[in-house]
Amino acid sequence: MNTLIVLLQIAAAVILAPLVSGLIRKIKNNLRMRKGASVFQPYYNLAKLFRKDEVISENTSWIFAAAPYVVLASVLVAFLPLSFMGQASFLNYTGDILLVVFMLSLGRFFLSLAGLDAGSAFGGMGSSREMFISSLVEPVMILSLFVVGANSGSTNPACIAACPAVRVSGLIAAFAFFMAMIAETSRIPIDNQETHLELTMVHEAMTLEYSGRRLAIIELAAHAKQILFFTILANVIVPFGGIITYPLKIIAISAIIGTLEVSLAKMRLFRVVDFMTFSFALSIMAMVAWAVGL
């Protein structure tokens, strides 16, 4: 029964993931004094893409065809160790929060290969930028999650959620993870999901050669990855309130993200190093604070 509940939770999270993206867009449009599209617009976009035919370059290999499915599968597997919505995780005794980082790295690796596989200039540029940014982001995520696990005595998400601890090291780690989450979800100031200029794209540049069903799968995986990070921040790093406050925390995180995107401008690529260096320094500070008992 527990397994069924967790699988239903994962299905619900994936189904509601586009709604969170629509909510962020709605918040941004309201802050800009615009009416904008409905919060359900991401669902309409996915439905339209699933109905469209695909155009695939003759120069691509099996990697290009398989990458969208690998990306989506890696995100779904990354959900399994998590304890959210007040229930134990599917991997309650063997799951580890660090598995999330490695599973997402698998999806990123295949998507980067797919960007190179088509042989387009912009796809290769996007893959190069994605690997460059991920090399800065992953150490921050691992260190911040390690500090949160160290405060609870376990890196098992269920144990972390069951033993919440308010410490200075945990607060610093939460802020560092939030900065890494912005980069991982392709948000301003690291990336801009609304841009149509190929020279400024990062994540979107890798998917320019995709269309139809496979593009819809990649978009769905991006929505699911976003709510995955929101869930980690809400129920693992800040595990207070349980099932009642989970939707409220997701809405609050969406509001913060939307406000930041309206308030900030996209950074130049090499300024991202400064941004992520600061977040890495925060994660090191969190580890030092944990080591001295704060």
Image (spheres, grey):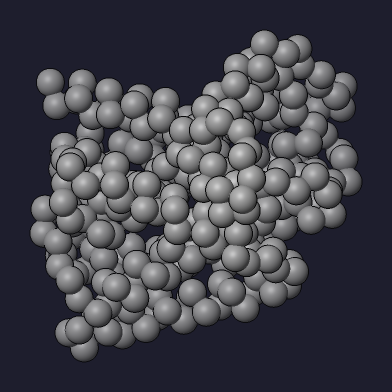
Q: Is residue 148 found left or right of 152 in the rendered image?
A: right
Residue in front for this viewpoint, 109 or 151: 151
Query: Across the whole image, how many numbered discs are drawn on residues?
Result: 0
Q: Is residue 9 found left or right of 120 in the rendered image?
A: left
Q: Give the residue at x 32% y 79%.
A: 287
Quadrant of the image for the N terminus? top left
Q: Position of residue 130 (x, y in %)?
A: 67, 54
| Above or below: residue 93 compared with residue 282 | above
Is residue 31 shown to the viewer in this render?
A: yes
Q: Position of residue 12 (x, y in %)?
A: 34, 26
Q: Position of residue 193 (x, y in %)?
A: 66, 47
| Above or below: residue 284 compared with residue 109 | below
Q: Give the residue at x 60% y 59%.
A: 262
| Above or below: residue 183 compared with residue 123 | below
Q: Is residue 290 found left or right of 269 in the rendered image?
A: left
Q: Give the residue at x 76% y 45%.
A: 205
Quadrant of the image for the C terminus? bottom left
Residue in front for this viewpoint, 31 or 186: 31
Q: Quadrant of residue 173?
A: bottom left
Residue in front for this viewpoint, 63 or 265: 265
